[in-house]
Image: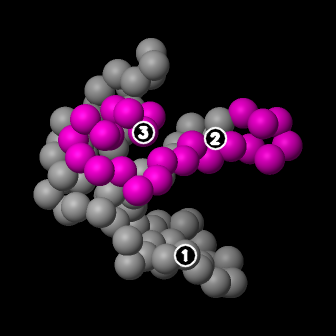
């Protein structure tokens, strides 16, 4: 995954989220890119593209409090949203 994004610029980190019990991918991940223009180019180019035989959806991450969660579960969101996450 990281190499696909590096074709568009510098990548600080790339992580696929794994299920802690099964060890399998949950089907999503996060890529952090320090340059907004490069990140936006990567989003445009990679959204709905094929990566390792799977069509991927690439979009800018939203802080937990801005996502439609389907109900108020309380608790905190946390996370460092000062960085660009895609």
Which mark is in front, 2 or 3?
A: 3
Is disc 2 in contact with disc 3, using a CB cutoff of under 8 Å? no
Residue at image location 49% in from the left, 77% down from the top: 80
Q: Nearer the viewer, residue 58 or 81?
A: 81
Q: Residue 54, percent across and down?
A: 44, 22
Q: Nearer the viewer, mark 2 or mark 1?
A: 1
State the mark number for residue 79. Answer: 1
Q: Is residue 66 above or below residue 61?
A: below
The residue that mark 3 highlights is: 2
Q: Which marked residue is nearer to the observer: mark 1 or mark 3?
A: 3
**Secondary element type, mark 1:** loop
Magenta stretch: give its range: 1-24
Q: Residue at x 23, y 47 (%)?
A: 9
| Image quadrant containing the N terminus | top left
Residue drawn at point x = 80 percent, y = 47 percent: 20
- Between the residue at mark 2 and the residue at mark 1, the CA separation in whole angstroms equals 19 Å
């Amino acid at each position: 995954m990281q190499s696909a994004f590096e074709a568009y610029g510098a990548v600080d980190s790339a992580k696929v989220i794994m299920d802690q019990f099964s060890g399998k991918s949950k089907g999503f991940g996060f890529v952090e890119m320090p340059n907004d223009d490069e990140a936006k180019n990567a989003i445009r180019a990679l959204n709905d593209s094929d990566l390792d035989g799977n069509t991927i959806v690439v979009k800018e991450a939203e802080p937990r409090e801005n996502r439609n969660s389907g109900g108020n579960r309380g608790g905190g969101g946390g996370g460092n949203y000062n960085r660009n996450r895609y």
